Image (cartoon, rainbow, N blue to C red):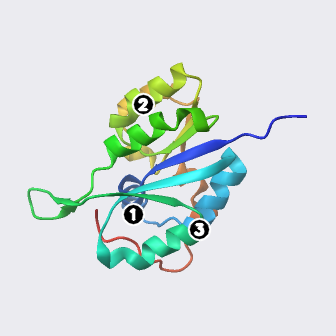
Amino acid sequence: MKKKENNYAFIDAQNLYLGTKDDGWAVDIFKLRVYLQEKYHTTKAFWFIGYMQENEKFYTLLKNAGFKIVFKEISQDGKGKPKGNVDVDLTLHTVDMLHAYDSAVLITSDGDFASLVTYLQEKNKFKVALSPNRKKTSFLLRKACGWKRSIQYLEDVRDELKTQTKQKAPSRD
């Protein structure tokens, strides 16, 4: 009997949000969670996001969809806009939980995760990187993923994942 996979998803929320928004669509978080379970056998999915009190309803939706939320404290960028850079937190959680999962699924387009991909590959713990859109995917991430072998694009399954109604998405974090 084949062992059931136990994969974890690690999601760079701002990258997902901005990547799909720039491409003219929004992800239905309920459909995304089912997609991750069915296609990549994810038993847990971690949503890394900057905390903003005005987004409480959205956080409740995330929890109801089955995501585990990892909050990052918000700071201000040079223009006074909120910024919740989750890269280090996502990387630390992914490495810290290495023993708990079979393979990691990363949702990001950010080249800062290239070294994490390489590390996970060396440990035989990397499944795939799911980039929100091709145009914004970092060269470094593509290179680390082996160009086509372990990187896929959510825009290719847009019709499957897009929201039909307006969800209250986080403003910007």
Q: Name the disc covering residue 65, or none.
A: 3
Q: Name the disc covering residue 21, or none.
A: 1
Q: Is residue 43 among the parts visible in the rendering?
A: yes
Mark 1 or mark 2: whose residue is earlier in sequence: 1
Q: Quadrant of the N terminus?
A: top right
Q: Name the disc covering residue 4, or none.
A: none
Residue at 18% x, 58% y: name it.
75
Q: Secondary structure at mark 1?
A: helix
Q: As rendered, which of 6 and 156 lies closer to the eye?
A: 6
> Looking at the image, is 157 positioned above or below residue 87?
below
Which amino acid is tagged 2?
Leu
Mark 3 or mark 2: whose residue is earlier in sequence: 3
The percent coordinates of residue 12 (x first, y second) are 41, 51
Q: As rendered, which of 169 and 51 lies closer to the eye?
A: 51
Crowd class of label 1 (few under 14; some 14 to 19; many from 20; radius 10 Å): some
Between label 3 and label 1, give the one nearer the viewer.
Answer: 3
CA distance for labels 3 and 2: 26 Å
Mark 3 or mark 1: whose residue is earlier in sequence: 1
Q: Is residue 95 left or right of residue 89?
A: right
> Looking at the image, is 64 positioned above or below residue 154?
below
Which amino acid is tagged 3?
Ala
CA distance for labels 3 and 1: 20 Å
Which amino acid is tagged 1?
Lys
Q: Quadrant of the C terminus?
A: bottom left
Residue at 56% x, 38% y: name it.
104
